[in-house]
């Protein structure tokens, strides 16, 4: 419902898998990642059409990866891991395009949209890390390499050529696509039981095995979309809220007209 609501304002949310185990796509920034095709586009793209194209390709993949060569290697890795009785984690990316400038707040810590989105993704079971834009990679580069410079033209108005910040600055959206990345740990229920302790006898035992997937990263990406949609919808209603879609649309249209005057 949140995604349907946001689509009424031309906001699109999607996701795709960029890494399973050590197999990743080119442009995902993963350290030691291998297995991708050479012509895969950089994922920190500032072009909404590129992100939406990657999403459509991912929807046709059994592992929800838009890179066909990497997807085949991921599938092979999952099959091999299943036979060994182990499990796999990975990384998925969630994006939101068409998000207006100014959602969120710079006023206080708990209203910053980047913080709220990070909390939303971290609340998903087994998610152990969240990045926005270049994320951790920013710490490895100099300021001149990571700052998104601002330009102006009569046709586009204010714009940026890069989106290293992931669509959010100072706790607020900056008009660029929101780019988020979440890292999922491997599923703990293994066909090859882990060692544990019986809490009554205190003696070593093997953990019980229940039927489970080998890798849930593709499914987690879909959950990530839902959490991002809910969070952005909340921020959208905080700014443009009303008692009906017509009223919200009027508030939104008035705001868009206002910011175009600058």
Image: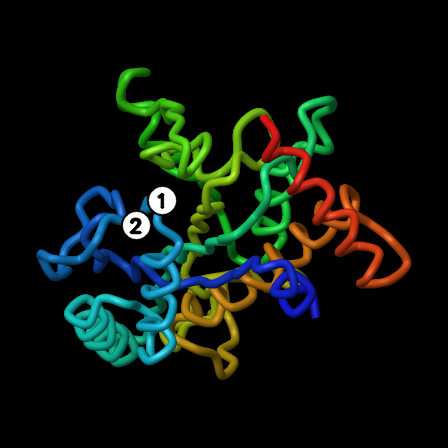
- Of residue 144 and residue 243, the one placed in the foreground of this image is 243
Residue drawn at point x = 41 percent, y = 72 percent:
190
Residue 71: where, in percent of width, then height? Answer: 23, 71
Which residue is at the far right?
243
Residue 248: where, in percent of width, then height? Answer: 79, 54
| Colour approach in the figure | rainbow
In the image, which disc is placed on residue 184? Answer: none
Which residue is at the far top?
143
Check the image and report above or below for 47 versus 19. above
Q: Residues within 10 Å of mark 2 (few under 14, many from 20)?
A: many
Question: Decide: marks 2, 1 in contact (CB < 8 A)?
Answer: no
Q: Secondary structure at mark 1?
A: loop
Check the image and report above or below for 209 versus 123. below
Residue drawn at point x = 51 percent, y = 68 percent:
222
Image quarter for residue 143? top left
Q: Residues within 10 Å of mark 1 (few under 14, many from 20)?
A: many
Q: Quadrant of the C terminus?
A: top right
Which residue is at the far left?
38
Image quarter for residue 243? bottom right
Residue 150: where, in percent of width, then height? Answer: 40, 24
Residue that carries the numbered disc 2 in the rendered image: 43
- Of residue 154 and residue 17, the one placed in the foreground of this image is 154
Check the image and report above or below for 84 versus 37. below
- Of residue 180 and residue 101, the one placed in the foreground of this image is 101
Alpha carbons under labels 2 and 1: distance apart = 9 Å
How many numbered tags mark residues here? 2
Residue that carries the numbered disc 1 in the rendered image: 46
């Amino acid at each position: 419902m949140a995604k349907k609501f946001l689509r009424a304002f031309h906001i699109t949310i999607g996701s795709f898998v960029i890494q399973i185990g050590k197999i990743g796509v080119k442009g995902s920034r993963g350290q030691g990642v291998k297995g991708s095709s050479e012509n895969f586009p950089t994922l920190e793209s500032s072009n909404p059409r590129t992100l939406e194209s990657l999403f459509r390709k991912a929807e046709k993949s059994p592992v929800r990866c838009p890179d066909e060569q990497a997807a085949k290697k991921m599938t092979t890795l999952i099959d091999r891991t299943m036979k060994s009785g182990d499990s796999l984690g990975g990384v998925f990316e969630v994006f939101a395009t068409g998000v207006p400038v100014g959602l969120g707040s710079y006023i206080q810590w708990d209203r910053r949209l980047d913080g709220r989105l990070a909390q939303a993704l971290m609340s998903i079971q087994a998610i152990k890390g969240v990045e926005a834009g270049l994320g951790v990679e920013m710490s490895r580069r100099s300021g001149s390499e990571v700052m998104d410079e601002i330009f102006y033209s009569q046709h586009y108005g204010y714009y940026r050529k890069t989106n290293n910040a992931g669509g959010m600055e100072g706790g607020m959206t900056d008009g660029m696509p929101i780019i988020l990345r979440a890292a999922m740990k491997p599923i703990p229920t293994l066909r090859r039981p882990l060692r544990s302790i019986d809490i009554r006898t205190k003696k070593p035992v093997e953990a019980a095995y229940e039927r489970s997937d080998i890798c849930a990263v593709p499914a987690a990406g879909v959950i990530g979309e839902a959490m991002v949609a809910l969070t952005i919808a909340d921020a959208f209603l905080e700014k443009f809220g009303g008692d009906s879609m017509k009223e919200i649309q009027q508030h939104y249209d008035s705001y868009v007209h206002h910011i175009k005057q600058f």
